Amino acid sequence: MIWIDIRDRYGITQLIFDEERTPQNVFEKAKTLGREFVIQVTGTVIERESKNKNIPTGDIEILVTDLHVLNTATLPPFTIEDNTDGGEDIRMKYRYLDIRRNPVKDKLIFRHQVAMQVRNYLSQQGFIEVETPYLIKSTPEGARDFVVPSRMNEGQFYALPQSPQTFKQLLMVGGMDRYFQIVKCFRDEDLRADRQPEFTQIDCEMTFVEQEDILGIFEKLTTHLLKEIKGVSVDTFPRMTYADAMRKYGNDKPDIRFGMEFGELNDVAKGKGFNVFDAQELIVGIAVPGASEYTRKQIDAIIDWVKRPQIGANGLVWVKYHTDGTLKSSVDKFYSEEDLAQWASATGASPGDLILVMAGGADKTRTQLSALRMEMAERLGLRKADEFAPLWVVDFPLLEWDEDTARYHAMHHPFTSPKPEDIALLDTDPGNVRANAYDLVLNGNEIGGGSVRIHDSALQARMFELLGFTKEQAEAQFGFLMNAFQYGAPPHAGIAFGFDRLVAILGGQEIIRDFIAFPKNNAGRDVMINAPATIDQEQLDELHLVVKS
Ligand code: ASP
């Protein structure tokens, strides 16, 4: 007897070739089959003698009476099984083989299901999916553009959209009222782990709405997805201002599934003779739950972790709040137990907690402590994949000062409207103007972001001026939009979700690459087709390009 598993998208079924019951020539042919051959068989479904309860077709097998080899196969470079022996690189190179494996295939099917839910839900709410062009002019979303040379227009280039931002706004001027699109966006950013140069957004825009309407509708979309896909019910989403998020979590996308809120210690830790602290702008700590009995070795490991160049801290101060209520710290020389009790109350620590304290420049220290907070939560298993804690972060600053270029940048993008009550500050104190901008955060990830837009050409022109554009530059780059605003532009607002990340989080994972059929690696390369690549001289000439060597 010969047993062979056949596999397709729907699963595995066992074939049986039996010398007694299968025709001789078919039986002989079965002996020549190899892994991953593509075959066609005819036979009878029969009950299996020894059943396999682990697979859905485990009760039956097919007694084969005829066999055709539709294609032979070279031995694959790794095993096509759920637990493969293939490393990441080799699987990326042979991605089409990787897709035959359940863990990859299932994620692509899952992605399709999420996309269908989004399309159906938004369509039911009256949104229309409209495609916008890919060969456009720069849309600033804070990254560099990928550009495409124009053969027919020497020296001229299209830019690939960083997002369909200006087009969706023009659709609103065009009266489309409710638009969405599941759309590719392209950003030439410096490499960061798990960033794809091309990625997908659920891009949305609406007219005659205010911030509150957008938050309401897209909160409902998110609740719908959590319910339909995860079976999880989430009520209203809490809201937090950007300023609070930075102060309490050192981060504009806080994971609120667990506590460890920042406690500021300037008032209670300065002036006690500990010079290291006295000179610092900010002293801030967190209470790590249940970690008061950490050993010297465990604490040293945390200190080493914050000293890594990625975090870049000089060290940290710790306080053990023992379960018997006593307090012991690494700076006992300078602080009495009463002092430390004040630290405990500022960080919200209870007996049994370990307080970790960092100090330095305010922004940098908050960022470092935020990273430590996430790391400790990870180590303590507090970032549970089956728990979902969405949050709106609102009231972002409109502008952000950039030291390198010594000018303001739009924190969201230049089309975002200031809060009406802050407009007067545009002239006097632009850095303190708040925007009608919002981010949707889920489990410490920004899954969506958007804003109420400027719909008045004079205000839009003022914004470009603040961002350092000359009148001519603004006109050349965005004249089309400011022009459009002169033809009766309705108030409008929108949002875009990062679809790859949303799918990954709903799938209980954080690596977005796994949910993309043909992803690029961390160096932005497609190692399967080997792109980017050089092009030949003829093509360069046609495009009027000269490559400097
Ligand atoms: N275009 C924005 C982005 O890509 C989203 C929005 O403002 O709607 O982040």
Image: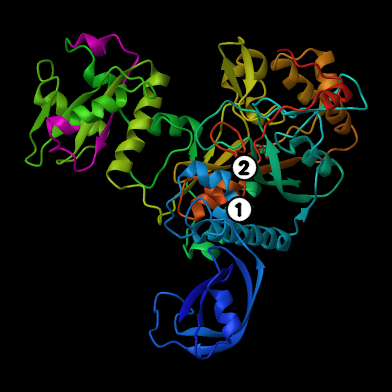
* Residue under the point 74% across and 16% down: 465
Amino acid type at circle 2 is Met
| Pointer 1 local density, CA inside 10 Å: few below 14, some 14–19, many at least 20 | few
State ligand 1's quadrant: top right
| Figure quadrant of residue 331 | top left
Depth check: give the residue in front, 545 or 221.
545
Q: In the rendered structure, does residue 349 fall within the stretch colored magenta?
A: no
Q: In the rendered structure, does residue 281 fall within the stretch colored magenta?
A: yes
Depth check: give the residue in front, 95 or 360.
95
| Figure quadrant of residue 525 | top right
Q: CA distance from mark 2 to mark 1?
A: 9 Å
Residue 383 relative to residue 67: left or right? left
Q: In the rendered structure, which segment of residues is drawn in magenta? A: 274-298
Element type at mark 2: loop
Q: Is residue 236 visible?
A: no
Q: Residue 361, how many percent across, how many down? A: 38, 15
Element type at mark 1: helix
Q: Residue 256, how many percent across, how many down? A: 40, 44
- Say above or below: 33 vs 399: below
Please give the residue where the numbered disc 2 appears in the rendered image. Answer: 528
Scheme by which the image is coloured: rainbow
| Pointer 2 local density, CA inside 10 Å: few below 14, some 14–19, many at least 20 | some
Look at the numbered discs 2 and 1 and tell me whether their residues touch, using CB distance below 8 Å: yes
Please give the residue where the numbered disc 1 appears in the rendered image. Answer: 96
Q: Residue 75, how many percent across, how many down? A: 54, 56
- Say above or below: 67 vs 327: below
Residue 440 relative to residue 535: left or right? left
